[in-house]
Image: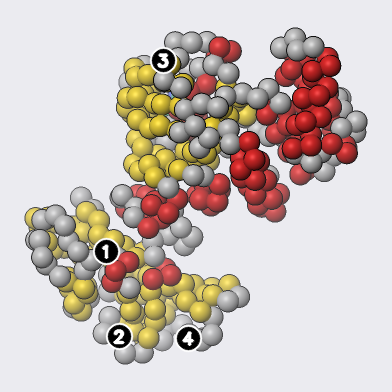
């Protein structure tokens, strides 16, 4: 078990800064998701933690010990690239035991640790099968077994479910989280998929161009996004924005959107005249006949119990997630009610 601490970690490739002075701590037994679009510096961060890439500056501490210049093999970290890369000519037992064999662990111990790992992953009944004939889910479990059999201090996973189809992906997301609940190994999991991060992680670090924009629990990131970038990246559909220009001062209680006064959540800081946006999640909007804020229905998407209705307003498109018990016609004029205590306020400058 281990705590990973990252201090002012920076990586520069010539004059391009891939990771810009990152700071975060993954507590012992915690599951952190590093989340962000392609190219934002997730893999580079992970490779520095693993010891596969030397930072330009900053430090990496494992359980308080500075390992920044330690070789990868001296860090007791398991790096899982893709969970399905197996040795096709070997049995399940051979695949799971391979890391121990190459470490020179005695055969008797390999046998018992492979069997213990197989029980944990519920693949003990297929230990002597060839991996080439396994179904996708079992292949993933074997690959996972190969990563955990060494009992490393922590796991680093780089988009391990990258190329799986949607159905397998959902199953593996559940299994990975259940496995984590059982073994509580400190984990850093890289993904560009916000659903994976929300479903699995204890903490999420949202990255943007080498910078960690927000670090927090999935609930904190969903309910109190620190920036429009984070708000827009999380949630499906993502947060809606209503842009306006105003000067805000302490105690101001409302702003005008499309000529309608909209009550504000507590405004804590004074903001001089600025481009601002109100943010609201689709589930915090209701459509009602009499609300003064108006829009016209642009489209709808039926989801069973719910529907996503897109409404065009004078300040942009809004998506509302509402019960599917009422049909809306395209072009229909509707009233829009916002849950005022759920509004976020962003500075767009
Ligand atoms: P992510 O994993 O989030 O997609 P990466 O960490 O792989 O992003 O890359 C971040 C940025 O750093 C990208 O723009 C990438 O092109 C650049 N980069 C990564 N590795 C190198 C390298 N060895 N040399 C030059 N640029 C690199
Ligand atoms: Mg990557």
Mark 4 Cβ and ligand 1 under 8 Å apart: no
Instruction: Name the disc covering residue 291, or none.
Output: 2
Residue plotted at (21% across, 59% down): 276
Q: Which residue is mark 1?
A: 278
Mark 1 and mark 2 lie on one chain; the one further toward the N terminus is 1
Q: Which mark is in front, 4 or 3?
A: 3
Q: Position of residue 184 (x, y in %)?
A: 58, 36
Q: Position of residue 283 (x, y in %)?
A: 43, 70
Q: Is residue 240 left or right of residue 202?
A: left
- Which corner quadrant of the image does residue 203 belong to? top left
Mark 1 and mark 3 lie on one chain; the one further toward the N terminus is 3
Q: Residues within 10 Å of mark 2 (few under 14, many from 20)?
A: some
Query: For the residue labelled by badge 4, is the local secondary structure a helix, a strand or a loop?
Result: loop
Q: Which residue is mark 3?
A: 66
Q: Which mark is in front, 4 or 1?
A: 1
**What colour scheme governs how the chains and residues are painted in the rendered image of this protein?**
secondary structure
């Amino acid at each position: 078990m281990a705590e990973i601490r990252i201090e002012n970690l920076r990586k520069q490739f010539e004059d391009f800064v891939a990771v810009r002075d990152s700071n975060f701590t993954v507590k012992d037994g915690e599951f952190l998701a590093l989340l962000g679009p392609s190219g934002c510096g997730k893999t580079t961060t992970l490779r520095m933690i693993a010891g596969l890439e030397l930072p330009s500056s900053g430090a990496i501490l494992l359980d308080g010990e500075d390992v920044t210049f330690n070789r990868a093999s001296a860090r007791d970290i398991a790096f899982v690239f893709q969970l399905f890369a197996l040795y096709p000519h070997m049995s399940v037992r051979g695949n799971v035991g391979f890391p121990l064999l190459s470490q020179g662990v005695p055969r008797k111990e390999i046998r018992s640790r492979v069997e213990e790992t197989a029980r944990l992953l519920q693949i003990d009944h297929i230990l002597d099968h060839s991996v080439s004939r396994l179904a996708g889910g079992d292949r993933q479990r074997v690959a996972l077994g190969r990563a955990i059999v060494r009992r490393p201090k922590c796991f680093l996973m780089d988009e391990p479910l990258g190329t799986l189809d949607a159905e397998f992906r959902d199953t593996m997301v559940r299994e990975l989280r259940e496995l984590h609940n059982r073994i509580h190994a400190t984990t850093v999991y890289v993904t560009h998929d916000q659903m994976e991060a929300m479903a699995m992680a204890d903490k999420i670090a949202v990255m943007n161009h080498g910078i960690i924009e927000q670090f927090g629990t999935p609930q904190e990131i969903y309910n109190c996004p620190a920036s429009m970038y984070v708000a827009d990246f999380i949630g499906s559909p993502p947060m809606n924005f209503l842009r306006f220009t105003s000067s805000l001062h302490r105690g101001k209680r409302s702003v005008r959107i499309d000529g309608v006064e909209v009550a504000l959540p507590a405004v804590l800081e004074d903001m001089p005249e600025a481009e601002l946006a109100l943010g609201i999640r689709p589930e915090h909007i209701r459509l009602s006949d009499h609300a003064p804020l108006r829009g016209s229905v642009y489209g709808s998407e039926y989801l069973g119990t719910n529907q996503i209705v897109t409404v065009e307003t004078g300040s942009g498109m809004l998506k509302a997630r509402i019960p599917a018990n009422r049909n809306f016609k395209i072009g229909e004029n509707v009233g829009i009610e916002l849950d005022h205590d759920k509004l976020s306020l962003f500075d767009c400058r």
